[in-house]
Image (spheres, helix red, strand yellow):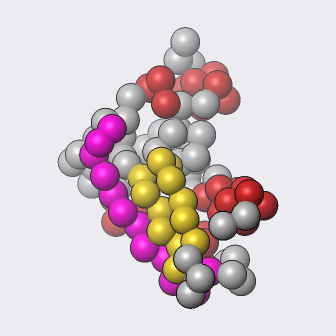
Amino acid sequence: MSEEMQESILGALENVIDPELGIDIVNLGLVYKVDLDEEGTCTVTMTLTSMGCPLAPVIVDQVTTALSELPEIKKVDVDIVWQPAWNKDMMSRYAKMALGIR
């Protein structure tokens, strides 16, 4: 996958807002990896802020919707992982500032 395509995918994912925190999943550091295969299947490896996140299905649906808008993507697979465990250090400077975290 080209760097330009990866940037397009991450840009689309910046439109997916965590409903509880009000910050996008990329800046929160929830997206660990994105991949696009030859058939147009985009695999997003990501985590959530907590294992029991009740909004997981909503976030997965939003990821699928956001990526489906890119013409190169024919199918979206979201792989939720728990390792490495998410922590506040994974957030971007922007997200930390928006949430008042130092």
Q: Position of residue 27 (x, y in %)?
A: 59, 40
Q: Is residue 44 left or right of residue 86?
A: right
Q: Position of residue 66 (x, y in %)?
A: 60, 70
Identity of the residue drawn at 44% across and 26% down:
88
Q: Looking at the image, which residue sits at the far right?
A: 4
Q: 40 or 67: which is nearer to us?
A: 40
**What stretch of residues is rendered in magenta?**
73-84
Quarter of the N terminus within the rendering: bottom right
Instruction: State whether residue 8 appears in this view.
Output: no
Quarter of the C terminus within the rendering: top right
Quadrant hosting residue 6: bottom right
Q: Is residue 100 left or right of residue 20?
A: right
Q: Position of residue 83 (x, y in %)?
A: 29, 42
| Residue 65 on the magenta segment | no
Identity of the residue drawn at 42% across and 53% down:
46
Q: 102 or 83: which is nearer to us?
A: 83
Instruction: State whether residue 94 appears in this view.
Output: yes
Vertical comparison of 34 with 66: above or below:
above
Q: Position of residue 80 (x, y in %)?
A: 33, 57
Q: Is residue 49 left or right of residue 51?
A: right
Vertical comparison of 75 with 52: above or below:
below
